Image: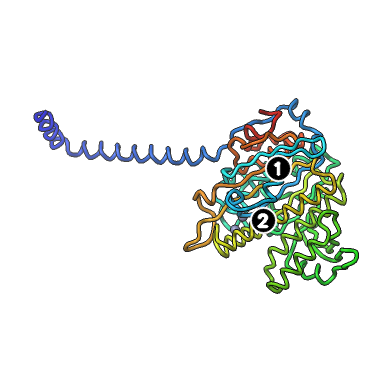
């Protein structure tokens, strides 16, 4: 043995140059292998697995729901699983309503796409592909969609995919963050878009008719040319939640005064608009989307999990309770598929309160479904770009060939 090392030492000495070259090559190879392993683990975590429903399966899915109602909660990450949210729990639990059995599928470990920025993820959720494909990745993406820039046309949103296959269909989208309406969702005369702005809150209070529970000249409609058009009426006389919007907003003003921010009041108006539009016109919209923004604002102001953040999640939960109560009173629970989704979470407070990176609290997302075709329990792996194929399947709409997202395993009874 001693001899062996002695000989080896002599050999190395004799071939010094060769040894250095071999060592460098070995080192570089190990580095490349490690990098490739890390990168593929990172990427693999974000590659969808699940079903692409067949035509026969879509036929079965068709007509099961009158509407899909999507509650988009910006920046809540996995926090629905970490705090007291009785209304979320009620909406997304198994129950029997009349003759109809409703099941719920809930996960708090869905995966947001990288970078964990709003525009990147909402665009992926609507357009079924990862950010490098739809074209919004880094470089002021939130501002760009707010200004009306659209995703790569090769990847239609599930809204467009639905309207292409159902020419008589109608879609509603009400947003507190205007990015989704202005940029993420395509423009089409059959899509009714409203954005809730701070000024709308004041107008609501000023114009409120306490007897009729109606306020005119509030909320801004975003038209096809993406310029704000005339404002419209908002109703506060929905059975099951009568007068709640006025009560909530006037309470908030009493407590905090009116500020430009008013984010929780705008979220309340966003929810109220979705309830009013869908309950007053139960046969009109097959997809109703809403974007609630206060949790993300709280994340930036206070940080993930701080009291201000918890309060924001509680207020959103209260809004979910209003939606549930109104649909229950209107007898609409049975023929609705409820979806709750979020773009990303937030980093733990300490230094910069933000998101965009790859930590667990930014990446883990809540995803919840409740409806009669849903498979009860926890679904298979969910990634944000799966939203488009999930909504499409629920409505019996064929997925776009260009989508990367899939319908996760164990999410719908008929798929398995
Ligand atoms: Zn966001
Ligand atoms: Zn944010």
In contact (CB < 8 Å): disc 1 and disc 2: no
Residue 365 to residue 243: above or below: above
Residue hosting label 2: 145
Quarter of the image with the N terminus is top left
Residue 124 visible? The answer is yes
The residue lying at 87 percent from left, 67 percent from top is 210
**In front of the other: 283 or 377:** 377
Image disc number at residue 156: 1
Look at the numbered disc 1 and give the secondary structure of its residue: loop
Q: Position of residue 47 (x, y in %)?
A: 56, 37
Q: CA distance from mark 1 to mark 2?
A: 15 Å
The residue lying at 59 percent from left, 60 percent from top is 309
Which mark sits nearer the N-terminus, 1 or 2? 2
Q: Position of residue 190 (x, y in %)?
A: 83, 48
**In front of the other: 178 or 254:** 254
The residue lying at 70 percent from left, 42 percent from top is 156
Left or right of 97 in this view: 310: left
The quadrant of the rendered image in which ligand 1 is seen is bottom right
Q: Residue furthest right?
A: 212
């Amino acid at each position: 043995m001693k001899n062996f090392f002695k000989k080896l030492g002599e050999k190395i000495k004799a071939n010094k140059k060769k040894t250095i070259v071999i060592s460098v090559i070995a080192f570089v190879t190990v580095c490349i292998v490690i990098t490739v392993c890390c990168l593929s683990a990172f990427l693999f975590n974000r590659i969808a697995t699940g079903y692409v429903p067949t035509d026969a399966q879509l036929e079965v899915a068709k007509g099961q729901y009158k509407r899909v109602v999507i509650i988009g909660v910006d920046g809540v990450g996995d926090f629905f699983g970490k705090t007291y949210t009785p209304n979320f729990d009620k909406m997304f639990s198994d129950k029997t309503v009349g003759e109809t059995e409703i099941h719920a599928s809930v996960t708090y470990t869905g995966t947001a796409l990288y970078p964990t920025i709003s525009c990147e993820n909402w665009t992926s959720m609507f357009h079924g592909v990862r950010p490098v494909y739809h074209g919004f990745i880094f470089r002021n993406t939130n501002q760009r969609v707010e200004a009306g820039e659209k995703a790569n046309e090769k990847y239609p949103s599930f809204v467009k995919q639905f309207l292409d296959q159902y020419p008589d269909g109608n879609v509603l989208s009400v947003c507190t963050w205007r990015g989704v309406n202005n940029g993420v969702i395509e423009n089409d005369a059959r899509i009714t878009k409203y954005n809730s702005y701070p000024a709308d809150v004041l107008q609501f209070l000023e114009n409120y008719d306490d007897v009729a529970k109606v306020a005119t000249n509030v909320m801004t409609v975003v038209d096809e040319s993406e310029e704000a058009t005339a404002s419209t009426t908002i109703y506060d006389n929905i059975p099951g939640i009568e007068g709640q919007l006025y009560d909530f907003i006037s309470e908030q003003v009493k407590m905090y005064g009116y500020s430009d921010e008013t984010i929780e009041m705008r979220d309340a108006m966003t929810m109220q608009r979705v309830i009013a539009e869908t309950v007053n016109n139960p046969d009109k919209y097959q997809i109703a989307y809403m974007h609630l923004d206060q949790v993300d604002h709280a994340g930036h102001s206070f940080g993930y999990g701080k009291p201000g953040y918890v309060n924001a999640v509680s207020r959103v939960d209260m809004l979910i309770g209003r939606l549930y109560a109104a649909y229950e009173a209107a007898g609409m629970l049975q023929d609705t598929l409820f979806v709750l989704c979020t773009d990303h979470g937030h980093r733990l407070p300490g230094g910069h309160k933000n998101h965009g990176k790859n930590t667990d609290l930014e990446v883990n997302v809540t995803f919840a479904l409740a409806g009669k075709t849903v498979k009860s329990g926890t679904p298979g792996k969910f990634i944000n770009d799966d939203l488009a194929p999930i909504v499409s399947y629920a409505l019996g709409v064929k997925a776009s060939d260009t989508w990367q997202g899939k319908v996760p395993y164990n999410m719908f009874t008929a798929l398995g």
